[in-house]
């Protein structure tokens, strides 16, 4: 089973609302995953920035392979999201521990997470070490369009999480500001 | 009337859930405000990153004064948020047009917005021009603690917005990961 591919021009809309994400890497031998809430869109192409550094075990693989996958979990995965953030890939196979299914990506060796709502395959553009900012370019995106639970989680940073609620439509008012293909 | 000051060590929790924000500047003569949804926490100190550039009229004042205020609007301010994003400070006094009340900050000349849930006064640390990333240091923070409407807005980027919903508590499970003073 593979997930339907999403147009790259729409991929930024997966990250723009600010959900907590899972970032996977593959160091050549093993896959690993970390929980990240410090993310930002930097371009519609799409380009993203995440903040991470040597304090995360995944950072070494990210730096070495210059690839990762940003996976978007939903509210039903809260304890997986928290659990992944509370242990280290240095001594834990997190895919096994949290029953995550690794699917092969199209463009990178880091795995997609089947259980997530969406997955964005990324290549590293630049690591800005003095700020621990990693700039990423999305190279393929996938979304489980038939998935029922679509509400994302928003980490507050104090141990609480806000669940994405109802959606308000201002498409008409923003017509001139939305890029083509979105 | 001024708003209660919030501990700087907690200020990152205002931005971490990924709300759309209003960013104010003051160029020496006039105040201006822009809508930004491309933001990220980069450090607990707090430090933030926003993506902006010369396509925003506010950028000139931000670059010149190296100061701004990040204000957090709530769901009742949706049409203000959309309206601010749809016009330019080049030909519009947005504080007047959208009936926003400018309050003086403690540390910067850019104004706080009284109508917002929270305001974070910021100084520019560095502008990384090749990615249009502006790194900011929070120097004072204010929160309208008695405000009833506290639900923030999360821009999807396609003209729709997700409203912050209920809050899930995992404080106990995350005890070791939450910095002191939060």
Image (tube, coloured by chain):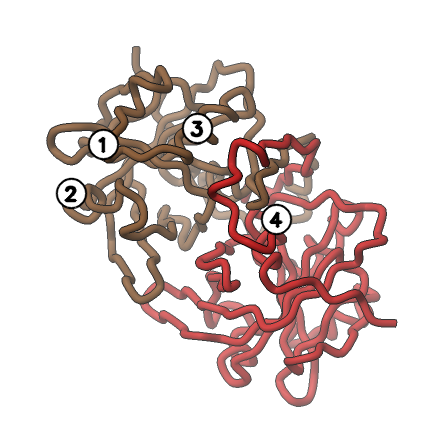
Chain colours: A brown, B red
Q: Are marks 3 and 1 on the same chain?
A: yes
Residue drawn where x is 27% and y is 27% of the image: A92
Q: Chain of mark 2?
A: A
Residue under label 4: B19
Residue reaching furthest top? A1
Give me the disc on residue A65.
2
Residue drawn where x is 63% and y is 39% of the image: B160
Label 2 Cα crowd, 10 Å radius (few <14 / some 14-19 / many 20+): some
The residue closer to the viewer here, B39 or A62, is A62
Q: Are marks 4 and 2 in contact (CB under 8 Å)?
A: no
Measured from the top left, where is residue B132 in percent x and y?
A: 40, 66
Label 4 Cα crowd, 10 Å radius (few <14 / some 14-19 / many 20+): many
Report helix, strand or loop for mark 1.
loop
Q: Chain of mark 1?
A: A
Measured from the top left, where is residue A174 in percent x and y?
A: 63, 49
Residue reaching furthest right? B1
Q: Chain of mark 4?
A: B
Residue drawn where x is 15% and y is 35% of the image: A27
Q: Are marks 4 and 2 on the same chain?
A: no
Cα–Cα gap, marks 3 and 1: 20 Å
Rendered view: A59 above or below A94? below
Q: Are marks 3 and 2 on the same chain?
A: yes
The residue closer to the viewer here, A72 or A181, is A72
């Amino acid at each position: 089973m593979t997930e339907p591919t999403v147009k790259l021009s729409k991929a930024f809309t997966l990250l723009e609302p600010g959900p907590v994400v899972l970032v996977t890497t593959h160091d050549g031998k093993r896959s690993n995953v970390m929980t990240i809430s410090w993310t930002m869109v930097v371009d519609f192409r799409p380009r993203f920035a995440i903040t991470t550094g040597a304090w995360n075990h995944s950072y070494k693989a990210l730096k070495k392979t210059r690839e990762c996958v940003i996976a978007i979990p939903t509210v039903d995965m809260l304890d997986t999201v928290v659990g992944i953030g509370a242990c280290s890939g240095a001594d834990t196979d997190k895919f096994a521990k949290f029953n995550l299914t690794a699917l092969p990506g199209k463009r990178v060796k880091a795995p997609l997470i089947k259980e997530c709502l969406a997955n964005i395959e990324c290549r590293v553009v630049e690591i800005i070490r003095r700020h621990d900012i990693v700039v990423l370019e999305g190279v393929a995106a996938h979304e489980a369009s038939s998935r029922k639970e679509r509400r994302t989680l928003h980490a507050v940073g104090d141990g609480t999480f806000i669940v994405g609620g109802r959606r308000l439509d201002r498409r008409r008012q923003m017509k001139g500001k939305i890029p083509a293909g979105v």
